[in-house]
Amino acid sequence: MLKTKDVTVQFGGLTALSKLNIEVEENQIVGLIGPNGAGKTTAFNVITGVYKPTSGKVYFEDNDISGKKPNEITKCGIARTFQNIRLFKDLTVLENIQIAEHLRIKSSLPSAILGFSSYKNEEKEMHERAISLLEEVGLLDNIKDKASSLPYGKQRKLEIARALATRPKLLLLDEPAAGMNQSETMQFISFIEELKRKHKISVLMIEHHMQLVMGICEKIWVLDYGKEIAKGLPKEVQGNKAVIEAYLGVD
Amino acid sequence: MKNRQDMLYRVFFIGLLFLSLFYLQKTMDSYAVRIINLCGIYIILALGLNLINGFTGLFSLGHAGFMAIGAYTSAILTMPENVKVVNFFMKPMNGFLVEANAPFVVALVIAMIVSGLIALLIGIPALRLRDDYLAIATLGFSEIIRVVFTNTYSVTNGALGLKMIPTFTNIWWSWGSAVLVILFMFSFSKSSFGRAVKAIREDEVAAEAMGIDLFKTKLLAFVIGSAFAGLGGALLGNLIGTIDPALFRFTLTFNILLIVVIGGMGSISGSVIAAVIVTVMMEALRFLDESVKIGGYIIEGIPGLRMVVFSLILMIVVIFYSEGLMGKKELSIDSLKEFGKSVKARKIHHRAQQKDVKKNA
């Protein structure tokens, strides 16, 4: 489904990513781990079009998407969340979701302004879909609240719901469990698994919570200094010597 | 059901507005009527700038330039041929333009279209810039327009300006247009397109990641806002009857920006209220510019003191009410009802508290 082929990103003389080859298959949850500064978020930014790869290509469903603009890539079916939550803070929870539905709108601006029935129906559909998404993630009681007024955990959930509202096939989560405690993390695992099942999506996530990564991911890629140092099943990665060295350092 | 009720309220309010305008026009002198006209025009101008700066979060300072384009377009289209010939004594007017003539409605629409098209041309390169860079680019554009209009004698009559423009603008034109623009803005801000625009204001990176085409959406807001500036400029030209390039200096943009900031960036009702307040005050404070006699002493008037007062008001607003009068909120039937409820709730709460106090005593 998603495939990066020898993707390299350089900022001046600094190589943030070199020859990255990640693969995500349909209905798979894949983890991307590595120490700080390993290039995980850079990998996300290349996949979502924020950066252009210096060399190499990104393929999504066999189409070359490298060099496309972020909004075009979202339209293709890749949605993301951000490491430091980026909600539309001053807008309501409901509006946050509805904005993510805008990219699929068919009506034109004049029909929206003049309130034609074609637009009204579409708006109604968007509203219903937003409501059902919010119900699913448990934010139905907050729909009229400002996004910034939500507690941290709910903001995380809202950001995921907003990404889902773009109707993605692949969801990229950048440290979704940051700041969660043990029991919250366990809840989060079942939350993600349920989303995957219900929406038939694949998930690629960056995470530092080893418990979460080992518990949920079917496949794991490990990066260090922009290079892939290991990949495979959670168990294989756990025992890998290079991985242990990268995390703990070498004597 | 709710929609029908909203519709009724809307029709009722617009009806009431026009009835009171009709009454004012009958009873007020021509000076007051002119101020009422200016209020309507400033509402249009402020909403245009609010759409760009307040709703979309762009920082444009080119409003006066687009107003100039609208004003000149409409003036040239509405002036009769003989008036044009009299006006252009330095250098004859371009033959095609001498014959160009259109009814006022058509002239207004063309003024909007021309301003919108030029905004499109300016926007395509300028909207790639961010924040202050965009502000400088649009400000530069506005000044360029003014300089161009000062030098194109065969089109604009240069620095001499246009005189004897038919004064078609009356309360019905200015407030009719204002009501249409207000309705447009409410409809737009509630629509999916309005939400997309607000998303860009809140967080560009997130908006783009959610599939919103930044460039197209920004361009849309910029073009519509500038077209409103063109409409306002056209109405202004046909109200005062004389226009010249010096009228469209940066201070004009500043006045409109003042209204938008005082009313609240991103609030339609805020802009409407502030437009009326500022326009009326601008006239009411005129005495500040004139000499004042206090107990035998004559204090010489300082022309422009009015604007100092406005600058002070702006500073106070920015420091103490950084959100403006309305913030991003709107005045609506629902919000009034809710306000009423909260007042009632507070009263009940207050009474209950007093009872408690008595009991305890």
Image: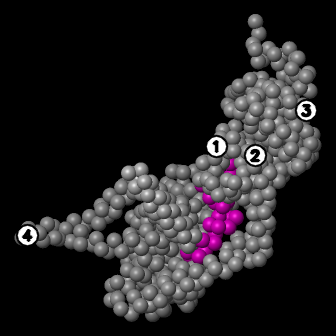
Dot 4 and dot 1 within a common chain: no
Local SS, label 3: loop
Residue that numbered label 2 is attached to: A160
Residue B320 shows in the view = yes
* Residue A245 locus on image (x, y percent): 79, 14
Q: Which mark is residue B295?
A: 4
Which is closer to the viewer, label 4 or label 3? 3
Q: Main secondary structure of the magenta part?
A: helix
Local SS, label 1: loop
> Identity of the amino acid at label 2?
Ile
> Identity of the amino acid at label 3?
Glu
Q: CA distance from mark 4 to mark 2?
A: 72 Å
Q: Which residues are magenta?
A: B181-208
Which is closer to the viewer, label 4 or label 2? 2
Q: Is residue B324 above or below residue B25?
A: above
In the image: residue A64, left or right of residue B247: right
Q: CA distance from mark 3 to mark 2?
A: 20 Å
Residue that numbered label 3 is attached to: A218
Local SS, label 4: loop
Which is closer to the viewer, label 1 or label 2? 1
Dot 4 and dot 3 within a common chain: no
Q: Is residue B168 above or below residue A107?
A: below
* Residue A224 locus on image (x, y percent): 77, 23
Q: CA distance from mark 4 to mark 1?
A: 64 Å
Q: Nearer the viewer, residue B248 or A75?
A: A75
Contact check, label 4 and label 2, Cβ < 8 Å: no
